[in-house]
Amino acid sequence: MAVIELKNLTYTYGEGTPFCRTAVDNVSLSIEKGELIGVIGHTGSGKSTLIQTLNGLLRPTSGQVLLNGKDIWAEPKKIRQVRFQVGMVFQYPEYQLFEETVLKDIAFGPGNMGLTPEEAIERAKKAAAFVGLSEDFYEKSPFELSGGEKRRVAIAGVIAMDPDVLILDEPTAGLDPRGRDVLLSQIIGYHKVRGNTVLLVSHSMEDVARIADRILVMNSSHAAMFGPTREIFARGAELEQMGLRVPQITKILASLRERGWPVGTALTMEEAVRELLPLLEKGGVRA
Amino acid sequence: MIRDIALGQYIPGDSVIHRMDPRVKIVLIFLFIVFLFVAQNFVSLLLLVVSVAVTMLFSGISLRHYLRSVKAILFIVLFTSVLNLFYGGGETLLKIGFMEIKSGGVSNAIFIAVRIVSLILLSAVLTFTTSPTSLTDAIERLMKPLKVFHVKVHEIAMMMTIALRFVPTLLEETDKIMSAQKARGADMESGGLVQRAKALLPILIPLFVSSFRRAYDLAMAMECRCYHGGEGRTKLKVLRAGKRDAFAAVLVVLVCAGVVVSNIFLPGALS
Amino acid sequence: MSENGFISAKDVVFAYEPEEGQTPRNVLEGVSMEIRRGEFVALLGHNGSGKSTMAKMFNAMLLPTGGKVFVEGMDTVDDAIVFEIRRRVGLVLQNPDNQLVASVVEEDVAFGPENLGVPPEEIRRRVDEALRAVGMYDFRLNAPYKLSGGQKQRIAIAGIIAMEPDCIVLDEPTAMLDPQGRTEVLETIHRLNEEKGITIVLITHYMDEAVQAGRVIVMDGGHILMTGDPREVFSQVELLKQHQLDVPQATELTHRLRGMGFPMPCTLTAEECVEALAAYLPPVG
């Protein structure tokens, strides 16, 4: 069953003014429960606006957002409930930390849900575990942590609300390779254990290729492509026209295919080796 | 577009008033405003209103912009004028219950309304035609004599420049933090006064922290670019008052003289 | 040593002022390196490797607690010549928003020369030239906050160029930018290096940026781990992986195949990798 369904979703900034600009134009699609979706598109393609309509931070100019089959704007007064079900981690989320201790900050969301303080703290502890924050961190001030640790606290703050859908906008932006790898594997781990739906907005095609089931490509306010990761990255030329690229490894194999060698689309190093090995062995050049 | 409000209100253009030396502009407009309050009768007031209208005309900025800035203070204008209606002597024009409106009150009300509106329009002429940086630059130079009294003129001007530069950035940041906290279920719309004040903390604290971080970064960037106070600093733009400015000054002085003369020879309208 | 290099660092040790009750920890533990005039050097490493601290040594924003740093033979601890050093070695920081001072682009670019007391006509010439050099001349009257991240970063670079430096050190200038902004900034600094002969020290953790440099220095834990041209450095895939540093996928692919016994060269880019593979694959057909 679809957890999120968009019907002719349109969002226009500054409607009725001479500066109005349609950021999302007539997008219809549906996302199944338990999927991990990669969202790609260059800056200004409409992807940031699109994800902000999913948890009701922006109200569509026209069209509908259905969450578990129900229009989220059916009762505008209850929009806060939608934000607990669709968790959103913004870019550079560490800038939203404000509490005295790590644990209190993570418990802010659950507290707003109306849970008792004890329940909220329980939730916070579970969420902290997902992002690899040990008990030693609980009573520390979030402001004395390193950049990567702050980021994980902020993500835990959203995970703690136990949303059905988790949206992450560029969660690895600005992290070094080590921090990026750790965070990505934590997100994958969380997704596997909880089995909920995750949307990952990213500029890193390598990351998206590695973890997404399906990919949504936004281009000039439209949903230009939406399909299984392998199929999307097989359309490298089209992506390049939209100012996007494919992972380097995918590009290497695509070039070989163009030149006539029978290799498939590879998303990871392992797949590339698997594709190339039989051919190389046939070439018989192994030393 | 909350950010546009903050960019000062500069509307780029090439009019005579745009091209005037900002120092001269500030001084003349200040003089103008003082004389709005010196004027004591309708003749001098009319003279000033006509002069304001001429200034607006020469600024080359559409009336729409001016109307918008007046609209913002319309309520204050109406409120003070209505209050003034009931003060002042002269013959009674209207009696509602125990309240009387006398002819003096009517003139008072008209005077106060015209003064406030003209004041707003004149400051609008200044801010519409002068970029924020030229403004701070002009203020720095006008205040230079105060250095004798150990006023840190350069530092004040630098603070103004930086404040102007960061207002839009911080507004954008406030927006982002608000969205992020709303996404965590922060409720900023309901509850009593205390609760609402408390609900601001999740926004104010991160904003504070980030302002400090920005200040630290900026200080470092400024040092990297050899900033060491106002000593020995030169400027990209050299302000030069020219014929245009002299001409404007003569006109303004003439108008002011007219106001003084009419004050002396004509009876006052205020009571 | 200090005669050869434009910048030379000798056994630099550095520790930040410790907080009360804590023992000072060295961020740099005896680092020596040399930057030659006109070079394009990438300084690579994780957060906390000491690479950003090293960058701030080059223009006397930080002073070594042990060892020496020389810029054109000038010792950076000499307080009297600190502006002389900062004029020659400009530093561009990570966050483009936090290093612009003025609300108009050209006035921001003028900030450096104004501080140096350059005459107004000369400032005008330098500002225009600097803005042209980064391809932002048409935006000279814009407000910085309306520009994209990549454009803002180019303005920050122009602000440094206007001081007519010999060297620009960039501390993770692309970390906060989108792919387009990254490309803009990289193209700009490569052009400055090639056309104006400005020495570039690029601090980054992006491997694809390091691949394009003339020389790569890898730092980890306050030490230099490796140094050499990109091919020498990236051919050591195992060592880089041990330190959890990235390797371009092309490099890794040829490395893996080499490990399986195929005589592949070390490749750095997708194109090189395709050519290398094409040479070993059986003929099409």
Image (cartoon, coloured by chain):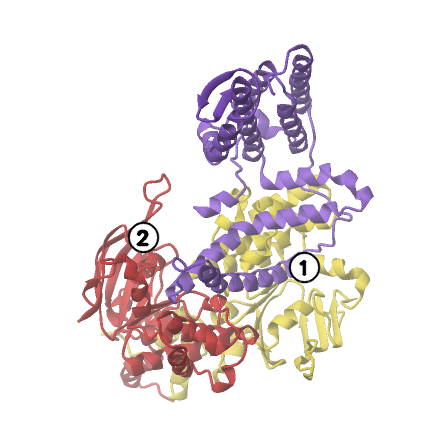
Q: Which chain gets the purple colouring?
A: B
Identify the residue at horizontal 32%, vertical 61% (top origin).
Answer: A51
- Counting other residues with Cα less than 10 Å from the Cα at mark 1, is it few (<14), some (14-19), or many (20 or more)? many
Spatial separation of the CA atoms under disc 1 and disc 2: 39 Å
Task: Name the residue tied to disc 1.
Answer: B224
In this view, the residue in front, A78 or A61, is: A78
In this view, the residue in front, A9 or C232, is: A9
To the question of a shared chain for discs 1 and 2, the answer is no
Choose top left, top right, bottom left or bottom right for residue A69. Answer: bottom left
- Furthest toward the top, the residue is B265
The answer, for residue C130, to whether it is visible in the render is no
The answer, for residue B208, to whether it is visible in the render is yes
Residue C150 image offset from top left, x and y in percent: 49, 56
Q: Which chain gets the red colouring?
A: A
Q: Could you tell me the amino acid type at mark 2?
A: Ser
Residue B63 image offset from top left, x and y in percent: 46, 27
Task: Name the residue tied to disc 2.
Answer: A220
Viewport quadrant of the C terminus of chain B: top right
Identify the residue at horizontal 27%, vertical 79% (top origin).
Answer: A195
Choose top left, top right, bottom left or bottom right for residue B241. Answer: top right
Residue A122 image offset from top left, x and y in percent: 39, 82
Q: Could you tell me the amino acid type at mark 1?
A: Cys
Residue A136 image offset from top left, x and y in percent: 51, 85
Find chain C in the image and tell me its colour: yellow
